[in-house]
Amino acid sequence: MSAPDATAATRLPWDAHDPYPFYEAQRSRHGAVAWNERAGAWIVVGYDAAHDVLGGAGWTSDPLSNPLVRQVFDPVSREFTAASMLFADGPEHSRLRGSVRDVFTRAFVRQLGAGVEEIAASVVDEPASGQPF
């Protein structure tokens, strides 16, 4: 196993619209944790392994800890990643997660449904003529 060429762009190895076939193939061929050349990263696709990794010392969710990723991320991507709860670890993750905890409950998200449907219908049903859509 070798690290990918630093000049090659790091890419997701799965279809972003439907990653589940990749996850299943990954688990059956390589197990719950394996290095992926295309992503230039370790891929974790098992619950127990993810729990161990996310809770264990010495692991990080921060893609910027990978020098290959730092080389291919533009400044906006680096800034977004540095400020995102998804890529934060430890106390910083807990702090950011706590700030949005109340709006990620099933009840809160469910009450947004009618408004989201109304907005989507107004955009899809009646696009303005002569405007890019």
Image (cartoon, rainbow, N blue to C red):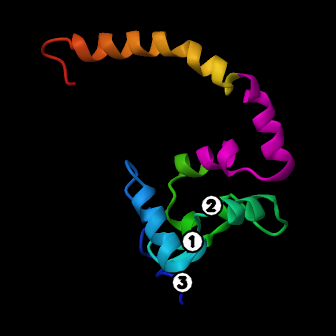
Main secondary structure found in the magenta portion: helix
Q: Which residue in the rendered view is the most extreme toward the front?
A: 28
Pick the quarter of the image with the N terminus.
bottom right
Q: Position of residue 29 (x, y in %)?
A: 48, 78
Q: CA distance from mark 3 to mark 1?
A: 9 Å
Q: At 40% from the left edge and 14% from the top edge, which residue is drawn?
A: 117
Q: CA distance from mark 1 to mark 2?
A: 9 Å
Label 3's element? loop
Q: Which residues are magenta?
A: 79-102
Residue linked to disc 3: 3
Residue linked to disc 2: 63
Where residue 47 sits, quadrant-wise, is bottom right
Amino acid at circle 3 = Ala
**1 or 2: mark nearer the eye:** 1
Amino acid at circle 2 = Pro
Label 2's element? helix
Does the image show residue 10? Answer: no
Q: Position of residue 75 (x, y in %)?
A: 55, 51
Callout 1–callout 2 Cβ contact below 8 Å: yes
Q: At 78% from the left edge and 53% from the top edge, which residue is drawn?
A: 89
Mark sitting on residue 41: 1
Q: Earlier in the sequence, mark 3 or mark 1?
A: 3
Badge 2: residue crowd in 10 Å (few <14, some 14–19, many ≥20):
some
Q: Earlier in the sequence, mark 2 or mark 3?
A: 3
> Could you tell whether 105 is left or right of 95 in the image?
left
Query: Does residue 133 show up magenta in the picture?
Result: no
